[in-house]
Every structure is written in C-alpha cells, then in structure tokens.
Image (cartoon, rainbow, N blue to C red):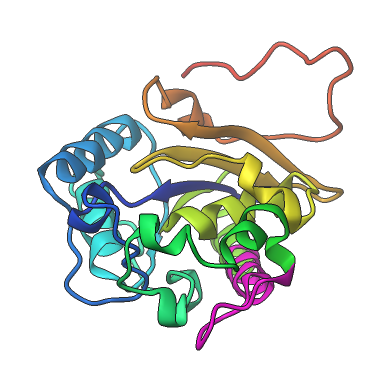
C-alpha cells in the first residue's frame, strides 16, 4: 500500500489557553503554531507527496497550506469531514482544568471506548470513521500512483492517536499512552498483512528517505538495515 504521513495541526490560540476547541469555527494557528507548521512543511519539502488530505477545520487547513506551499508539485488537496475533530458536544469551548473535575474525565483517561461525550460523539465512533477514512484514501492513492506513493493527512490530536492505536493493534482504551504534539509527524504504512508504524510524534529530523517510498514485505527478523537515504 501507499504510505501516509499523519500531521497534527500546529498550536492554536485555544491550545495556548487550555481551551477545548472541538469543532468551533475561527480557531486558528497562533504564531508558534504557524512556525511549527512551516517547519513541518520544510521537513516534508524533500518528499514528493501525491496528496494532502485535511480536516475541514481552519487550523488544519492552515497547516496543510503551509505544507503545500513547500511542495515542488501540486499535490491533490481535498478536505475530508471524516478527519475532523471529535464532536465533544457540551465539553466544547470549556477549559481543560474545568473538564478535569467532571465525572467523565477519568473515564476518558482510562476507558475511552466507553465514552460518549454529552451531546456529542463517542470516542469509538471517532476512531471508526477516522481509520476508515485513512484506509480509503490510502487505497485510492495506491491505485492511482502505485505502492511507492506517499501522502499526508492533516488532522487532530485524538484523531491521530486513534489511527496510530489501530495501526499498532492497540485497544482504544490504551490510546492515551500515545502522544501527538502540535505539527508532529507520524508515519504509517498499510501492508498486505498488517500496518507498520515507522514513526510517531516527531517534530524534527530528516524525512528525505521517504522520497524513495517504503517498500515493505515481511518484517525483518532482528530489525533489518533500515531505510536508504536518496
């Protein structure tokens, strides 16, 4: 299959003030977030990506544009509603410090598969729709560009954590063990027999080796020799 680079949006004004933005409109990157996203764009500039699929929310589209601005070609750049933020319902717009006093908070931390946000979405439904979207786009990009294709999905922290958990074969109840920072890069390849996770939560380092694509088969016993730089 193709290779997907999962990018979380850069830091926002809401992140900086400890606010759960959810799906609220008008939440944009602050200056630090723009700098973070630009750095991610610089890291990906050496990788000829075939597509940059984004959540429709402003902070993700801003991040996606900073990636697209640094690409030599013109990657396909659709918006996908299934990559949008979790619907936090009545939690949206409240501070994290306030939400930490709610009875549901410890359940979110320890048993997210049982969580349905009041007036919103369940975390299980969030994972189901986002994983399905990633796999759908991945299959489409491979069909059009071949198994060496590399593409980018720009989304949100909990969305990306749930996608990585699925790729690792982890139960959703363990996904809080995964960290996904602003503008971080994680890399997943969906092979014929299983997904392979090549990186999580990176915010620095050379990604030019991805320009060769990842051609994986069976997992090498002992770890193998790694990817070759171009």
Give whichever of 195, 102 is nearer the camera: 102
Q: Is residue 136 left or right of residue 16?
A: right
In the rendered image, residue 154, in percent from the top left (x then y), is placed at 39, 56
Is residue 80 visible in the rendered image? The answer is: no
- Tell me where residue 227 sits by quadrant: top right
Chain part drawn in magenta:
114-135
Q: In this view, does 206 lie to the left or right of 13?
A: right
Is residue 71 visible in the rendered image? The answer is: yes
In the rendered image, residue 226, in percent from the top left (x then y), is placed at 66, 16
Give the residue at the far left of this rendering. Answer: 31
In the rendered image, residue 40, in percent from the top left (x then y), is placed at 30, 36
Please tell me whether the stretch drawn in magenta is mainly helix, strand or loop. helix
Does 23 sit above or below residue 10?
below
Give whichever of 114, 141 is nearer the camera: 114
In the rendered image, residue 203, in percent from the top left (x then y), is placed at 38, 29
Residue visible at 32% across and 69% down?
94
Does 225 sit above or below residue 207?
above
Q: In this view, does 49 lie to the left or right of 14?
A: right
Looking at the rendered structure, the number of numbered marks drawn on it comes to: 0
Q: Magenta stretch: residue 20 in it?
A: no
Q: Is residue 7 left or right of residue 28?
A: right
């Amino acid at each position: 299959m193709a290779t997907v680079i999962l990018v979380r949006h850069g830091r926002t004004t809401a992140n900086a003030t400890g606010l759960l933005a959810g799906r609220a409109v008008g939440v944009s990157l602050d200056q630090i977030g723009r700098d973070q996203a630009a750095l991610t764009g610089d890291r990906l500039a050496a990788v000829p990506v075939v597509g940059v699929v984004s959540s429709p929310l402003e902070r993700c589209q801003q991040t996606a544009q900073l990636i697209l601005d640094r690409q030599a070609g013109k990657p396909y750049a659709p918006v996908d509603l299934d990559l949008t933020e979790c619907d936090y319902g009545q939690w949206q717009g409240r501070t994290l410090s306030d939400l930490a006093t709610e009875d549901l908070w410890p359940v979110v931390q320890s048993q997210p598969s049982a969580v349905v946000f009041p007036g919103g979405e369940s975390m299980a439904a969030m994972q189901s729709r986002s994983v399905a979207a990633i796999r759908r786009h991945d299959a489409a990009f491979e069909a059009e560009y071949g198994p060496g294709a590399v593409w980018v999905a720009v989304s949100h922290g909990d969305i990306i954590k749930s996608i990585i958990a699925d790729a690792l074969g982890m139960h959703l109840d363990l996904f809080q063990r995964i960290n996904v920072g602003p503008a971080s890069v994680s890399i997943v390849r969906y092979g014929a027999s299983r997904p392979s996770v090549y990186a999580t939560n990176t915010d620095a380092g050379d990604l030019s080796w991805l320009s060769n694509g990842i051609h994986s088969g069976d997992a090498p016993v002992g770890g193998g020799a790694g990817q070759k730089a171009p």
